[in-house]
Image (tube, helix red, strand yellow):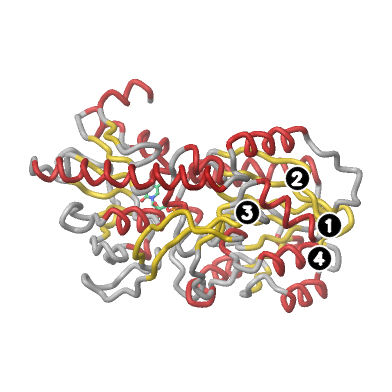
Amino acid sequence: MKKIFLNLGLQPMANNFAIKSKNKQKFYNLKIKFDNKNYLTSISKIIPSKNIYNSHYPYLSSMSKTMQVSFKNLAKKIKNKYKPKNIIEIGSNDGSFIKYFNKKNALCVEPCSNLAKLTRNKGYKTFNNFWDYSLIKKIKKIIPNVDFIYSANTISHINNLNTTFDCIKKILSKNGVAVIEDPSLLESFKKNIYDQFYNEHVYVFSLISLKKILTKYNLEIFDIDRLSTHGGSLRYYIKHNKNNKLKINKKVFIQEKKEIKFGLNKFKTYIKFAERVYDSKKKLVDIFNKIKKNKKRIIGYGATAKSATVLNFCKINNKHIDYFLDTTPYKINKYTPGSNILIKKYERKLSTEDCEYAFLGAWNFKKEIFLKEKDFLRKGGKFITHVPFPGIIGKKFKNKL
Ligand code: TMP
């Protein structure tokens, strides 16, 4: 049975950056539910994929050093440990991962045509398609036995998990490995990361939820990596359950135990999370109101998709935040969805002359950003964050750099 545990209010599409201020947005009610049969946590209203993943999808993986390092390390590990003869990436984005593999043996799948163009231009065979049965038929003609499948921050965006995993099952060679990585529900709950929920994140997975669905397709998780990306992610290594060559690493059992101990199999844990989220909202709004009462300037740092959830849920808008700074070309000179805050191009390091406070929209890249902006912090500039708790990070932080 599916039960709603959190109501994040009226939300726009998180990546719908508006061209004009006060641009009309379509809002929908973002509610989050838990299914106690398969342990899946999902958003209650699904927006059709073709309305989101089209010719102007803004997110580029290469915009973050953290992700680049993560991809580079994984590519090295895959080559050394699994030595695949070929590899497919589902959701290849701008090619930040696949670039480490030989063009002759790699294949990209990317439904956003603006992104598919990027890997095609670099010489990679790229299918501008969604991951489904008709696509795997086409792929099988080129690579009948796929040795390795990789997909980062993509499977959680796909509504139909049955088709997704059935297609993986059908195309993966006997000894093949599929690796998927997505934000971890356990980490999201521990750190009160409620902005992991927005229209593109249909699911936030736990190991126990993925295990249930994979069993249906005779697939099995045999290893995991715990990652710091996106506030805490899990990388799942998946094999056919008949493949006994790959042994199940004890890390899998440890993670499963942790999730059960935390109560991810019980609805009351979800209700408690929601209570913390409503409390977090109150505290964040208080912080903004106090700063504005003192007539200090606040800007936003990183107009992330996640921040759309926070800003619209907490009703923080251009009365609170003067403008956002962001590095993604597509977002520049547009307005944040719903909250209508102008996004300016990040051209130089932040100065205390720009603002006294910067709201950390890209909190998931906090380490990278604080290192970059250490002078701002040293000179008394402060960051506002809501993760794990609403608060202000200032000078004191410099000692930890
Ligand atoms: P994401 O959280 O959805 O991955 O989006 C990250 C956004 O933050 C992306 O638009 C780029 C932006 N960003 C900056 O503007 N400055 C930075 O230093 C970093 C790491 C990200």
Nearer-N-terminus badge (2/1): 2
Pinpoint residue 22: horizontal percent, then vertical percent: 21, 72
- Vertical arrangement, residue 255 with respect to residue 330, above or below: above
- Mark 4 lies on a secondary structure that is helix
Mark 3: few/some/many CA within 10 Å (<14, 14-19, 20+): some
Badge 2 amino acid? Lys
Q: Is mark 4 within 8 Å of ligand 1?
A: no
Q: Which residue is denoted by mark 1 in the rendering? A: 218
Q: Position of residue 379 (x, y in %)?
A: 20, 29
Q: Residue at x 51, y 55 (%)?
A: 61
Q: Where's the N terminus, which quadrant?
A: bottom right
Pick whichever, 379 or 14, lies toward us.
Answer: 14
Which residue is labeled 4 in the image?
Answer: 171
Residue at the extreme top: 399
Q: Nearer the viewer, mark 3 or mark 4?
A: 3
Kind of element beneath mark 2: helix
Residue 188 percent coordinates (x, y): 50, 44
**Quarter of image, res 150:** bottom right
In primary-sequence order, the first of circles 3 and 2 is 3
Tell me the kind of residue under disc 1. Answer: Asn
What residue is disc 2 on?
Answer: 79
Q: Residues within 10 Å of mark 4 (few under 14, many from 20)?
A: many
Q: Which residue is mark 3?
A: 36
Of marks 1 and 3, which one's residue comes earlier in the chain?
Answer: 3
Q: CA distance from mark 1 to mark 3?
A: 21 Å
- The alpha-carbon separation of the residues under discs 3 and 4 comes to 30 Å
Closer to the eye: label 4 or 1: 1
Q: Amino acid at mark 4?
A: Ile
Q: Earlier in the sequence, mark 2 or mark 4?
A: 2
Give the label, 2 or 4, closer to the camera: 4
Image quadrant where one finds the C terminus: top left
